[in-house]
Amino acid sequence: MSDVTFNSGRTVDVTDADGTIRDWFVSQVWATPCEDLAELLAPDGEPWGEGRWVLTNGPDVGPFKERLAEVHPIAEDVALPEIVEGGPVEWVAEGRAVTSTWRRRRTGWDGYVDWSAFCFTPEYRCSIAATVIEVDQAEWRTIELSTTGPFVLWLNGEVVLRGGTVSYMEPEVHRVRVRIPSRTSTIHVATWQVAFRECRHIVRLRVLGLPVRVVLPSPGADETAARLASTVLARIASRSWAIEGTEGVLEAPPGVALRIRVSEGLWQHVRVDDDGLARYSLVEAEEMVDEGGDTERSAGASMLTSGESIIEVGVDDDRCPQTVALRVAVLPPGSREVAVGGPAQWRQEVLAQVTGESTEHGAPREAGVASVLARHALDPATRVTRQDVASALHRVVTRGDCADFEAVALVTAWHRVPAQQWDAGVRESVEEALTGLRYWITQPGLDAMCFFTENHQLVWHTAEHLVGSAFPDATFVADGRSGREHAAEGLRRAAAWIGRKLAGGFSEFDSNAYLAIDSYALVSLVELGENEDLRLAARTLLDKILLTLAANSWRGIHGAAHGRSYVHTLRSSRYEETSPILRLIAGVGTLNDAVLPVTALALAERYEIPDVVRTLVTEPAPVWWGRQVYRGKLAFERDLLERPYRSDVRVWRTPDVMLSSVQDYRSGLPGLQEHVWGATLGREAQVFVTHPANADTGSSARPNGWVGHRTLPRVHQERNAVIHLQRFTHSDPARYTHLWLPLAQLDEHRVEGDWILARRGDGYVAVATQGGVSPVTRGDTAWQEWRSATGGAAWVATVGSRSENGPFGDWVAQVLGGTLIWGGSGGSGGSGSEEPSVTWTRTDGPDLELSFDGPFLVDGRPAGFVDGVPETEPHLDNPALRLEFGQGEATATWGGASFELPVAVALAAAQRAGDAGAAGEAGAATDTERPEQPEAEQPETEQPETGQPGTELLATIEGGSDGR
């Protein structure tokens, strides 16, 4: 009997229907710091034009990155590595020999091999991917390669295509005609990128025409066994992204032996039981860190913490090397939807979590600035050690992104903790770091710190004012100016920023990440600022922010529509950066890792949270219907954009459910990170629809698969009902929308015709689209993602509750008693008109009708009209407060508490503070005989746009900031 085995030593797959290759071997990313930027940019030259502002990764960065690519060409004169699973990869990256190991990767539905990462400091990134294709008949084919950066493509060892263009999020497409021989052919693709913070680093390859086999050499593999394994892996499902506890559960065909590992830990060997379930331990689960990212991440400063872990699953047989990767998140355990205790207890809980005395958020906290501040508040004898400030100093000294957050933390510690309680040399290190930092885009320096988003603007101005005030006589390294001059400049700019937001509101409206950062900067100004007018203006705006946060939240969940958000916060509110603030305000929400903002608020001595803000959360209304309109103007020198902005957010909530949306927000235009509408029934029971741009869910794809929209929909809401219309384009990689509705987080559901209806507790939600929905039943969105039978060009949703609508069954009957008439396909290729529309006749509310370009009709009348003409929009309008644009003051009242919002007084104070800053700059410059600043630094008066809301004060305030 022969002992010869017939293992083929390879696995075999087939290209997708469009010719996309899904199966690859990939190298790691080889990252090298950008140490030669000064050869292409003058560190102390004009910032605008072709100057250093391009390092901000703004909309015009591509040409500069292409110039860098010319200086850093991809190596071509190297031996191509043999393509074999687990084999060595030897390469040359940025002129140095590097090594890696081939790792198998199957792409997502979009076909992209993805090395994307968020990089806190500038770095060059090189990587290589390889695959093998096989055809039986030689023929000419077109190869199409899509990528966001320079590349070199080899076919059978010969270079057949090169590209040098750089794009931001949308990939560039390149094609070449090649002859493929009748045997296996090797394909190598080397890629290059330069990262200035978020870096979309991807490549996709299509072989146009008939399908080809994709054959990956793998010692010991057998293609027949591997094919059987792949059919099983295609059925692996994780029903819940959010997991509580230390055990995960997968669904798989019964009886199959699986190998499972968490965060690249040890393999666990599991047999699927007769119920089709495989249980595995999550004890090894750790937060997923983007490859190439900065691992010296300062606690609480980053807005990128995802909470995710990667679960890798394969068939437990050496002949079957393939695996599938699933994402799950082990939730922080300490969370409340209902308040317990009072303000003193809530503050104590926050401080205990920040210091590490409590592990309510799931793990002990490491040392950090927030921790030492909280420890000092509890024990005034606390000392500051080098470890306490190490991560913050790292971020500041390296000028990494988010250095502004840490600069404010460090100067706060400088003031809060007496000098004699700092370990030797630590205080001096802090002073050196803070006076060595640059504080605005116009100041000399070559780094990729973000200055232009709304939240960073204020934090930079705050940091500059507070640090300059702390060290008035010091010479700041970046520009040679004194701390006194920087303090005055920061004062002027902070005052102007506050004035704009007092009068008009935020472009990053209701961000569940960045509203916390805005609050952090404002309370720091109130607590540490030396200018009384600035403190008054900051205090008033902070009152306004916390008032809207309370009004637009539900049971500790910031469930409003958001101008900027991230996937993990939409899947679980426990990761919202605003959640710890709600815990401090009203005892609800989650104590997570976003500790700097909540620590600053918890330690406030000058600022006091208004009672009405607390009662808005702790004493919810039986029915709440609120509106919030924000308007303003973006200016290039601070926003890198030049246009007006506007948002109109509606919030409907009862004690059992919440529905919120932003009305007609930039409909039909490209999206970024917007959360346009959603229903909220619990911390992980959030329901919404998006138009996916790609398969990614990370922070470096903006938009991605679940946050933002490739093209923004048109959405309108009338109290407890919302309509969503989607217009597709022929370039959409996914010409469909999808629904997030996680059944594992709900108590019951029904699918009836076009509708899916669900209940959690006493809260109800119903969503409908033409042809109804069906669940995705495999992968890590199983029974959480739902697809429309017709593409989903139109959706409707409504919410209800037991208190308002009776038992769930009765409410279901009410909803199903209405009628829906769908029109158009949104360009998705269906029958009928391209323009999507819906007419909704309801039994429990007014009839609604909307087309993509037509009016939103409520019982036949166009919404937004008063006395036959378009309305004059309010700024804030809800049961606790009504505030018109330009109104000087308003009173917020709720639950027996009230407080005044003195907008005009605060605007006048901001004006005086700005004037004082400008005078201080002029005086300091005269005292030091400093030469005149470049033209871009000179303030100029900005007139409000036609129809721009606000007061006359705003016109004089806006121009005095941000390098205009």
Image (cartoon, grey):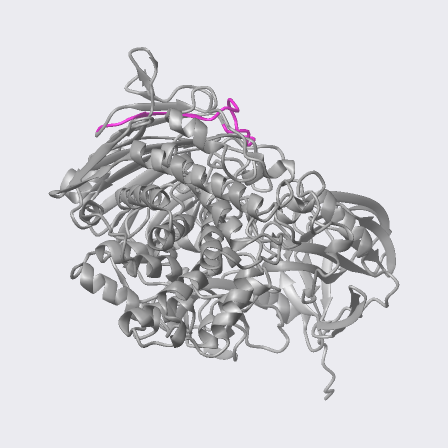
Q: How many marks?
A: 0
Q: Is residue 671 left or right of residue 814?
A: right
Residue 827 located within the stretch drawn in magenta = yes
Q: Residue at x 76, y 59 (%)?
A: 190
Residue 955 located within the stretch drawn in magenta = no
Residue 294 image position (x, y, % from top left): 57, 65
Residue placed farthest to the left in the image? 896
Comparing 507 with 370, the one in front is: 370
* Magenta portion: prevailing SS class: loop
Q: Magenta stretch? A: 825-843
Residue 430 image position (x, y, % from top left): 50, 67
Q: Is residue 356 left or right of residue 425?
A: left
Q: Is residue 238 left or right of residue 429?
A: left
Which quadrant holds residue 812?
top left
Q: Is residue 361 visible?
A: no
Comparing 827 with 447, the one in front is: 447
Residue 578 image position (x, y, % from top left): 35, 53
Comparing 490 with 523, the one in front is: 490
Q: Residue at x 42, y 63 (%)?
A: 329
